[in-house]
Amino acid sequence: MEKTNLLYEGKAKKIWETEDKNLLISEFKDDLTAFNGEKKSNEAGKGALNNKISTELFKLLEKKGINTHFKEMLDDNNMLHKRADVIMIEVIVRNIATGSLSKNLGIEDGKILPFVLVEFDYKNDELGDPKLNDQHCIILELVDNVEELDILRKVAREINDILKPYFANIGLNLVDFKLEFGKDKDGNIMLVDEISPDNCRFWDIKTGEKMDKDRFRQGLGGLKVAYEEVLNRILAK
């Protein structure tokens, strides 16, 4: 499958059209951004690591019955997937309080939440990805009806139920993660984008070490080493 036209370039990926109108190619970039693009850098090999990690996790979720856009990994930096109309809602799943949840609400950093928290953010960089409630989503026409929001929450929790014990078995706490969804040509909702240390928080169960993009956000260094460790644990499972 060959790339034809560049359809979109975001902070982490380029999206290419192919000769098949129903299939696209995501090219994973080495760029790093944080705080809505205010902090930027580049880490050689980061894109390939995210592609490989996402490939393994998409394959796992497909086996467990989650509908995703994934087709195959073409090479280190390129993934073939189904075309989707992206729903402009970021679905945030939280198991442990940290980051903006602790900052905005004063919940103790590292506190295990009494239940899985699912939040919606508006996928809009210019507005800073603000929080959404159901009424906002309907007013902005991000979904067709409230039932679609219920589907997003349900599938997000199902994904958490699969990934949380999976990562626990390789010594990582799945602290929180961001999901994106889209609709295929028939209007079916499916998981899109990626699942990687760029949009998940992983803490080592024994040491508490952060194994995700917080290493870049917080200036800890060692980002590529951490991503490589996550991939190695997945492949060794």
Image (cartoon, grey):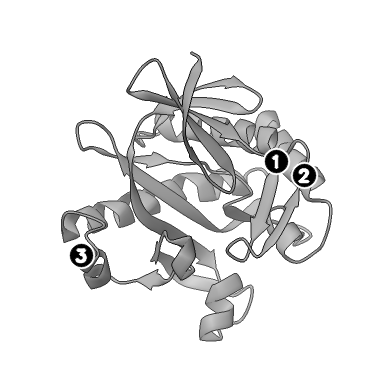
Element at label 3: helix
Above or below — where is 131 with respect to 214? below
Question: Residue at left 26%, top 57%?
Answer: 142
Q: Measuring 38% from the left and 41% from the top, which residue is drawn there?
A: 191
Q: Nearer the viewer, residue 183 or 229?
A: 183
Q: Secondary structure at mark 1?
A: loop
Q: Which badge, 2 or 1, comes first in the chain's sequence?
A: 1
Q: Within the image, what quadrant is residue 227 found in?
A: top right
Residue 129 seen from this side: no
- In the rendered structure, which amino acid carries the disc numbered 1? Asp
- Residue 143: horizontal and vertical position, in percent? 23, 55
What is the CA distance from the residue labelled 3 to the residue labelled 2? 39 Å
Kind of residue indicated by mark 3: Ile
Where is residue 85, by image quadrant?
top left
Element class at badge 2: loop
| Mark 2 and mark 1 residues within 8 Å of each other at the beta carbon | yes
64 versus 152 height, above or below = above
Q: Position of 108 compared to 209: left or right? A: left
Dot 1 alpha-carbon crowd within 10 angstroms: few under 14, some 14 to 19, many 20 or more: some
Number of the label disc, if any, that sits on residue 43: 2
Distance from disc 1 to disc 3, alpha carbons, whole Å, reads: 35 Å
From the top left corner, tell me how far across and down residue 135 is, in percent.
22, 71
Q: Earlier in the sequence, mark 3 or mark 2?
A: 2
For disc 1, the marked residue is 30
- Judge whether residue 223 can be spotted in this image: yes
Q: What label sits on residue 138 in the rendered view?
A: 3
Disc number placed over residue 13 in the picture, else none: none
- Residue at image coords 35%, 54%: 88
How far across and how far down the image is residue 45, in percent?
75, 35
Q: Residues within 10 Å of mark 2 (few under 14, many from 20)?
A: few
